[in-house]
Amino acid sequence: MASYVCRIGLPDGAIAVRTIDAPDEDAVRAEIQRQGGRLFSVKQASGGRGGGVSIGGLVPGRKRRVKLAEFMVFNQELVALLRAGLPIVSGFDILLERQTNPRFKAILADVRDQLVSGTALSDAFLSHGDAFPRLYSTSLKAGERSGEVEKVLRRFLQYQKILTGVKRKVTGALVYPLVLVTLSIGLIFILLTYVIPKFTEFYSGFDAGELPFLTLVVVGTANFLRAHVLLIVLSVVGTAVFLARWKKTKSGALAWDGLLLKLPLVGMVLQQFALSQFSRALATLVAAGTPLVPALEISAGSISNRKIVKGVEAVVPRVREGAELWRSLEDTGQFTSLAVEMIKVGEATGALEEMLTNVSEFYDEAIESTLQKLVTLIEPIILVIMAGVIGTILLSVYLPMFSIIVKMKT
């Protein structure tokens, strides 16, 4: 089953662009004729399972997103042109001349051609499947209905800037501890595989006799690592490859993300970040006028943690049946009491967008505070642990020297 973007003449004389799931184009034509419509054009969406149209030399069926930085620059320039009163097609012509990425340029050229043929901007972007965030196309569609495309684009840009800023803070806070751990492990590996064996030869030359227990343990570990270094490296690489592939499976990603949420401190940061992603995406869609049920479905796709995604997806059918949003979210067990209470107030007062924005802002501040505490704690802990390990190795090296010095004096 593949997705096809169709330009259709409706029985009432209107022209519309629809996305239809069907086995092939013949089935699409048959379905449109059955509904009394007329098919003007049909194109397989690039995100469809059956492959995709080839655009600008792209390999059919590949699902690569446009780089976020380039996409953000394009939208900032588009907003500036729309604010200046330039027609959107003319704006695309100007932006196409400035675009240097051949893949992105080919996609924009196709979007521009669809605009000229009468396709809505949101449907033109949606026809390229996973190349763009679904949140973007849905926001555009809501903006087209309200006549506020520029406002919707500015809101989307603000959403992405804030989200990118939070990601940068999380990544930046974890870089230093990761580098520190990596360097310490490398130093320990060098000590055990190169330095310790040299000292072992030194002791045998001086007839140090029976070595201390600590030295025997360290020397034994060093000899094992040196004798099986290739096997150990292959095992580590093999495990890393297995985990990478396992995490790409649906069950593996769900289990891995669930495990991450259980980690002390780190799990709290990841949960707060996921709740911030969900709240900000849902607030953006609600503010643009998107109905709650489709807004929930799209917001679930903006969450980076699969465990929480599964919880939000379980909420969608309940809300569709008329259940309260806050109660449905509470029953998942993935949302904090604070988030649930604020959403509850937003539903009761009709200020859901405002309360969702407050939730995301609160968690953005909480993430920054937690990260500061995490970095403050983790740095001395790592230093103490690594100093203890390296100190133990060095002590095991120098203990036999004391015995040698005593023998030499006697």
Image (cartoon, rainbow, N blue to C red):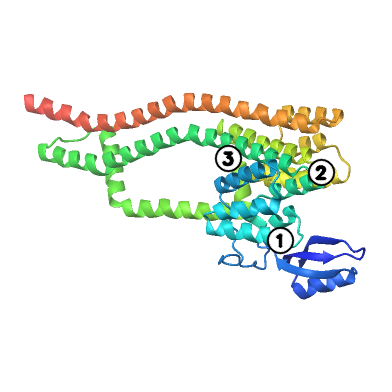
Work out whether mark 1 precedes mark 3 in sequence or the reverse, and give the earlier one.
1
Question: Mark on residue 114?
Answer: 1
User: Disc 2 marks which residue?
Assistant: 146
Residue named by callout 3: 260
- Toward which corner of the image does residue 196 lie, by quadrant? top left
- Name the residue at 48% across, 24% down: 376
Residue drawn at point x = 65 percent, y = 40 percent = 157
Q: Look at label 1 and name its amino acid.
A: Gln
Q: Around disc 2, counting alpha carbons within 10 Å, would you say few (fewer than 14), some (14 to 19), or many (20 or more)?
A: few
Assign a secondary structure to mark 3. helix
Task: Give the mark nearer the N terminus: 2 vs 3.
Answer: 2
Locate residue 209 relative to residue 20 in the image: left or right.
left
Kind of residue at badge 2: Ser
Quadrant of the rendering where the C terminus is positioned: top left
Q: Is residue 216 or residue 227 the one in the foreground?
A: 227
Question: In terms of secondary structure, where does tag 1 sit?
Answer: helix
Marks 1/3: CA distance? 43 Å
